[in-house]
């Protein structure tokens, strides 16, 4: 019998892998008492357990190594591009020795449960040795890939021969010489071990459920050229890694796979194949992870390579992954993996054609065949990301267990914490970049963030930190929205939890990238721990809030624009601003094909000639007509500047869209644009039949200043007694030039349309004295009753939001049938960006539906 002890410390860290080791260093440096608990009998985590033949990292060792000890970077030299497990384990041991870490690590100790005490504000940690610990802060450095998945194959316990799991390989190795060996699984561990097991075994049979994509690692000494940037300035190199997409400095590709010629694309894929770097696989082109067609080009390329290596076409076929896009399951790096299937004693069994029915005492039975083996190797993967965390029975506030809380999938704030479980931290938890990155970079970032947070809490005489429910719910939403923009959720992967029966299927890591994620975590701190409740002797602060409200595609677009460091448009002069608008328009996706495009002219209000572009659907006419007024602050733009949106509306509403180039300021100031709106609508209504339209079915539509013109046109048509306007679609309309509402001030900068640009537009268009005229500010009209039905679309992050909202409310108040679509997380410029901004697709669909409904046709999107 051992006597149980309770130890009191500030911090308990579970896990002595790279995360736990560095966390211990940071805790010591910050003056916290800390103990690490570890199941294994030494440090190393992943690299302690996974000792199978061929085990090695697949991020270059120069990148997959600690950066927090500058001396270590000089003291340690990796022998290969991708160091093997023994070398990485030696590295972990070297660090443990150097920093004397083992004195604070209790090995051979598994944490079984942890319970929060809301009176003492402490965690009690129970271990399998019978010893308890009491701590203020409980940090789970338990690893993303540390809980082996239990094989879900019937008869697994029945086999009487040798059984091995790649994830818990015997420390003194295994000799397969002369043996008949089965390997079950073809993930990373299998891909690495199969060639080496084949080299020893008498016979090797590989049982494959799903093939994976793999490229040659081209291991060996790292080239001087590849190492040069690191040696030149290790600090700068590490910094670049921290700000990068996946934790390795790489140039960001700007071109999509379909933007280059076939020859060019193949040449770049060949270079990727030769380079042998994991992140290069999907990093050759910008859109591989977003666009199925682009990904198909990569998939075809790798299939071609597999077929060129593997002699037997049937085996090659079975090895070609077809049920997922490249990168949506973790791709592999290999040494002679595909070549191994050309060896006479190696056989592949395709379980999709011939599934395993049971494991027997002497081997494996598939539906069609019985196999006899001396040894079975399970390379069946892990209960990834959440397995080791919920593997401990954790009870938080009010008796809530983490397993209950996460029953439908993990809910975390930043992948670091979860509400109801104060002072519980996860390193590389679900909801952080973790397994989608060079984990060393992600580990260090989390360790640093946690250490800084604990110091912050202590310095303010507080003792608990916990995220709010709002913050974590919206973080999960943000992460899912990012994932949904990619092809990732389309695969049955362990990223989605699909490999573990009964596990909730949600995308587990944060797919927004390491650099962007780090900036978010830093911003949380800068905003005084936004989304956290801090509590203790000095009081309780609830800083509830949402760290990322912009939709991810909008966020990325704004970041890209910010990186370009463009001067404000209003400083470019009118000609410069117009040229800029033309150039940026040319870079946008073109929108869908329409049946016909006709360019023509019509008379403006002063008898001048206005150009128009007519978009006709491919369906048989006649069609309803939408008179469209482009955006650009009455100063910029033309009949073709909103071309993608006009095409979209034409195709999806089955209407003719006539985009009119009304006169622009400053050459033609107020009320030129407003008067041209009415003149154009009148002429188009009068010529509806010639244009292929249905008389009496003319609606108006517009964006921004164009929506102002559309709204004014509808009002003027009512006052003039015609033409009859069937409806109005107003996207982010300018409705009041006399007042600056809250949205004008809150969204003044950094969101595309700025308040100062809007002021510049107004100054060019209209004297302050005229701005109260309803022809400039339709919201100020005395009587809005009798106007045609309207769809008003407003965006949360738009200076014009509140005046658009006010117009929708005023129309509704006047008895006009109004559909008001408020778009959360969207900006002024997002919605017209057809095919570029995917999260606003529903708003475009609503605009098209509104046009259909004005003409009495049924709606399609249901928005
Ligand atoms: C074969 C393999 C290859 C990999 N290659 C790469 C690579 O090339 N690049 C990359 O970025 N990442 C790679 N990874 C991911 C790898 O897991 C991380 O890079 C990193 O090693 C994780 O470190 P960690 O300290 O967070 O977790 P781990 O190294 O997994 O350590 C967690 C530790 O916690 C202990 N533990 C868990 N639960 C308990 C408990 N209840 N009580 C006590 N102790 C517990 C475990 O025993 C383990 O030692 C690989 C993973 C595997 C499995």
Image: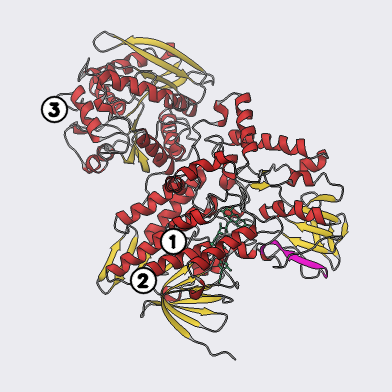
Q: What residue is disc 2 on?
A: 31
Asked if the residues shown at circle 1 and circle 2 are in contact, with their CB atoms under 8 angstroms apart, the answer is: no
Label 1, label 2: how far apart the Cα atoms are: 15 Å
* Frontmost residue, 395 versus 36: 36
- What residue range appears in magenta? 160-167
Asked which secondary structure carries label 2, the reply is: loop
Percent across and percent down for residue 504 are 57, 59
Asked if the residues shown at circle 2 and circle 3 are in contact, with their CB atoms under 8 angstroms apart, the answer is: no
The quadrant holding residue 128 is bottom right
Q: How is the image coloured?
A: secondary structure
Image quadrant for the C terminus?
top left
Q: Quadrant of ligand 1?
A: bottom right
Percent across and percent down for residue 409 are 52, 60
Q: Residue at x 70, y 55 (%)?
A: 54
Percent across and percent down for residue 156 are 76, 67
Question: Crowdedness of circle 3 by 10 Å Cα count: few (<14), some, many (20+)?
Answer: few
Q: Earlier in the sequence, mark 2 or mark 3?
A: 2
Label 2, label 3: how far apart the Cα atoms are: 63 Å
């Amino acid at each position: 019998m051992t006597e149980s002890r309770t130890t009191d410390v500030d911090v308990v860290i579970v896990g002595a892998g790279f995360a736990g080791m560095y966390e211990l260093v940071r805790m010591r440096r910050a003056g916290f008492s800390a103990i690490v608990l570890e199941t294994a009998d030494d440090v190393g985590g992943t690299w302690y357990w996974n000792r199978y033949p061929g085990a090695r990292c697949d991020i270059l060792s120069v990148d997959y190594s600690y950066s927090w000890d500058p001396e270590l970077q000089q003291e340690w030299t990796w022998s290969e591009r991708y160091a093997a497990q023994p070398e990485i384990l030696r590295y972990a041991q070297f660090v443990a020795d150097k920093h004397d870490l083992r004195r604070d690590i209790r090995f051979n100790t598994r944490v079984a449960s942890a319970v929060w005490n809301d009176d003492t504000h402490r965690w009690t940690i129970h271990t399998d040795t019978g010893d308890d610990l009491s701590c203020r802060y409980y940090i789970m450095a338990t690893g993303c890939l540390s809980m082996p998945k239990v094989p879900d194959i019937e008869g697994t316990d029945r086999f009487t021969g040798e059984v091995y799991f790649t994830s818990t390989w015997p420390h003194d190795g295994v000799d397969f010489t002369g043996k008949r060996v089965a390997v079950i699984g073809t993930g990373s561990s299998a891909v690495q071990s199969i060639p080496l097991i084949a080299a020893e075994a008498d016979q090797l049979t590989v049982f494959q459920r799903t093939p994976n994509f793999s490229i040659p690692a081209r291991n060996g000494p790292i080239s001087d050229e590849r190492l040069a940037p690191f040696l030149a300035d290790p600090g700068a190199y590490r910094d670049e890694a921290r700000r990068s997409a996946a934790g390795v400095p790489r140039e960001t590709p700007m071109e999509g796979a379909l933007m280059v010629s076939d020859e060019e694309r193949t040449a770049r894929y060949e270079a990727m194949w030769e380079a042998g770097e994991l992140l290069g696989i999907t990093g050759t082109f910008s859109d591989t992870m977003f666009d199925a067609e682009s990904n198909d080009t990569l998939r075809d390329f790798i299939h071609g390579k597999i077929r060129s290596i593997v002699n037997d076409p049937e085996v090659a076929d079975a090895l070609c992954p077809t049920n997922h896009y490249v990168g949506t399951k973790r791709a592999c790096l290999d040494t002679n993996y595909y070549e191994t299937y050309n060896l006479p004693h190696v056989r592949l069994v395709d379980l999709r054609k011939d599934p395993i029915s049971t494991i027997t005492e002497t081997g494996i039975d598939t539906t069609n065949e019985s196999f006899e083996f001396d040894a079975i190797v399970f390379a069946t993967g892990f209960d990834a990301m959440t397995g080791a965390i919920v593997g401990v029975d954790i009870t938080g506030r009010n008796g809530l267990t983490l397993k209950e809380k996460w029953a439908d999938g993990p809910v975390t704030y930043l992948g670091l914490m979860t509400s109801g479980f104060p002072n519980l931290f996860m390193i590389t938890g679900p909801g952080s970049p973790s397994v989608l990155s060079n984990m060393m970079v992600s580990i260090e970032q989390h360790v640093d963030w946690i250490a800084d947070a604990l110091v912050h809490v202590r310095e303010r005489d507080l003792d608990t930190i916990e995220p709010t429910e709002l913050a974590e719910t919206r973080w999960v939403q943000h992460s899912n929205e990012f994932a949904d923009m990619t092809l990732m959720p389309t695969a049955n992967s362990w990223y989605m939890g699909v490999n573990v029966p009964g596990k909730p299927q949600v995308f587990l890591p944060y797919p927004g990238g390491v650099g962007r994620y780090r900036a978010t975590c830093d911003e949380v701190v800068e905003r005084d721990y936004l989304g956290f409740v801090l509590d203790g002797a000095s009081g309780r602060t609830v800083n509830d809030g949402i760290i990322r409200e912009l939709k991810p595609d909008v966020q990325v677009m704004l970041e890209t624009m910010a990186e370009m460091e463009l001067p404000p448009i209003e400083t470019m002069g009118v000609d410069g601003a117009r040229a800029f608008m033309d150039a940026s328009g040319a870079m946008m996706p073109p929108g869908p094909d329409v049946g016909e495009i006709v360019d023509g002219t019509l008379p403006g209000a002063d008898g001048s000639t206005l150009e128009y572009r007519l978009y006709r659907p491919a369906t048989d006419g006649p069609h309803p007509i939408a008179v469209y007024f482009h955006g650009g602050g009455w100063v910029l733009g033309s009949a073709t500047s909103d071309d993608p949106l006009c095409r979209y509306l034409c195709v999806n509403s089955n209407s003719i869209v006539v985009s009119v180039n009304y006169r622009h300021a400053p050459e033609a100031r107020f009320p030129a644009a407003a008067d041209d709106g009415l003149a154009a609508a009148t002429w188009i209504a009068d010529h509806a039949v010639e244009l292929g339209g249905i008389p009496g079915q003319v609606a108006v539509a517009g964006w921004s200043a164009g929506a102002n013109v559309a709204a004014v046109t509808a009002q003027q048509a009512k006052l003039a007694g015609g033409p009859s306007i069937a409806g109005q679609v107003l996207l982010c309309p300018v409705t009041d030039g006399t007042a600056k509402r809250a949205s004008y001030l809150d969204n003044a900068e950094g969101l595309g349309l700025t308040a100062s640009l809007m002021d510049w537009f107004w100054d060019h268009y209209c004297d302050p004295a005229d701005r109260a005229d309803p022809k400039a500010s339709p919201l100020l009209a005395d009587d809005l009753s009798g106007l045609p039905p309207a769809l008003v679309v407003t965006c949360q992050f738009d200076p014009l939001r509140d005046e658009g909202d006010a117009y929708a409310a005023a129309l509704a108040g006047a008895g006009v049938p109004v559909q008001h679509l408020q778009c959360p997380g969207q900006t002024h410029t997002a919605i017209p960006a057809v095919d570029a901004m995917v999260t606003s697709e529903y708003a475009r669909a609503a605009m098209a539906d509104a046009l259909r409904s004005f003409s009495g046709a049924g709606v399609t999107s249901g928005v």
